[in-house]
Image (spheres, rainbow, N blue to C red):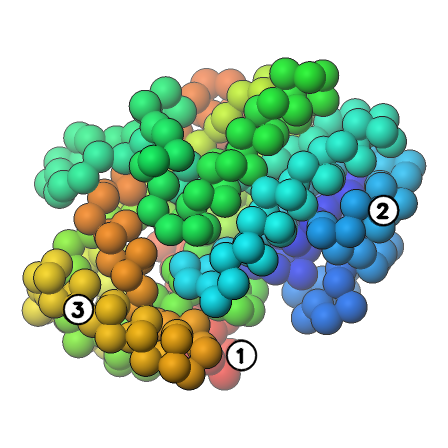
Amino acid sequence: MLAFVTGATGFLGSHVARVLAEQGAQLRLLVRPTSDLRNIDGLNADRVEGDLRDPASIEKALAGCDVVFHVAADYRLWVRDPDEMYRSNVEGTRSLLEAARKQGVRRVVYTSSVATMGFTSGFSSNHGNVADEQSPVGIEDMIGHYKRSKFMAEQVAIEAARSGVDVVIVNPTTPIGERDIKPTPTGRIVVDFLKRKFPAYVETGLNLVDATECARGHVQALEKGRSGERYILGGENLTLKQILDRLAAITDLPSPTVKLPYIFALAAGVVDEMVTGRLLGREPRATIDAVRMGRKMMFVSSAKAERELGWRTVPVDGALRRSVEWFRDNGYA
């Protein structure tokens, strides 16, 4: 089986590529001329240069491939030029699916995001308000360009499935583990904690999933998923405070005890976005959209993936520990 993987130089994509290699697949990896190749060092794989925004390069790269794992995405919670994100996430997905149709690819596994699910606002101490694939949601529920672009790209994938392309959609929650080279917004939580830049926390929650297990879920979707269906690949539902407490137990560093009210977190986001983002042209550590998203507890159920794919929900302590060790070993903290 020749598997084409986009995003293999990134965090989750590198895990997908390595799981495929371990299971004996031949790999063809899409890279850009400017890609950081550290995450694919040592992988026995063909590398082809191309860009999701260049349909001709994608169609050429897909020639002869049996399956596609489209993991690449522009994952930022702040971007100076939003159109750039939509070109990559939405139009890039459209181009790849069309190229897959033309080249006769057997199946596409499209990596969406849990961000496209329908979440309710407010805090649930018993984690009772969990979202799943059937939770009502629309484009108007998407906060920020990243979420909107992923929601729109997911609709492109669903429409492609309706028109005859065999595409299965997976919705990872918040992957954690090694090789988060950017790092992602979630990885920055770990890095900031290691740098003792977490004097306070806000009342929010995430579902963390082991990145390696999430990659295995992609392969399960290839083998067992139904075309046009969405599958949440999740791990543990945890409040931010619980995540920080687990990091404290792993590192012996103190966990913050001060809870920051929403209005102060929002004010910090406004200031950081104005100064760091608009004046200095760098991605802010805190953004208005990130604070707004934090008002929703992003707790989910992976029951559908468990039933149909054989997915197993596992504790994330090992992934958190690997993340800490990798960031320390690679000079991030």
Q: Which residue is mark 3?
A: 267
Indicate the secondary structure of the residue bearing disc 2. Answer: helix
- Residue flagged by tag 3: what amino acid is it? Ala
> Which mark is nearer the camera, 3 or 1?
3
106 in relation to 260, above or below? above
- Crowding at dot 3, Cα within 10 Å, few <14 / some 14-19 / many 20+, comes out as some
Is residue 94 left or right of 298 when viewed as pictured? right
Is residue 181 left or right of 244 when viewed as pictured? right
Spatial CA span between label 2 and label 3 = 45 Å
Q: Nearer the viewer, residue 114 or 187?
A: 114
Q: Which residue is mark 2?
A: 56
Residue 158: x and y, percent? 57, 24
Q: Nearer the viewer, residue 185 or 150?
A: 150
- Residue flagged by tag 2: what amino acid is it? Ala
Which residue shows up at 25% across the image and 58% down it?
291
Residue 183: x and y, percent? 48, 68
Q: What is the tally of numbered marks visible in this picture? A: 3
Tags 3 and 1 in contact by the CB under 8 Å rule? no
- Crowding at dot 1, Cα within 10 Å, few <14 / some 14-19 / many 20+, comes out as few
- Crowding at dot 2, Cα within 10 Å, few <14 / some 14-19 / many 20+, comes out as some
Visible in this render: residue 19? no
Residue 119: x and y, percent? 27, 35
> Which mark is nearer the camera, 2 or 1?
2
Q: Which residue is mark 1?
A: 330
The answer to which of marks 2 and 1 sits earlier in the sequence is: 2
Is residue 276 left or right of 88 when viewed as pictured? left
Give the position of the C terminus as an image quadrant: bottom left
- Residue flagged by tag 1: what amino acid is it? Asn
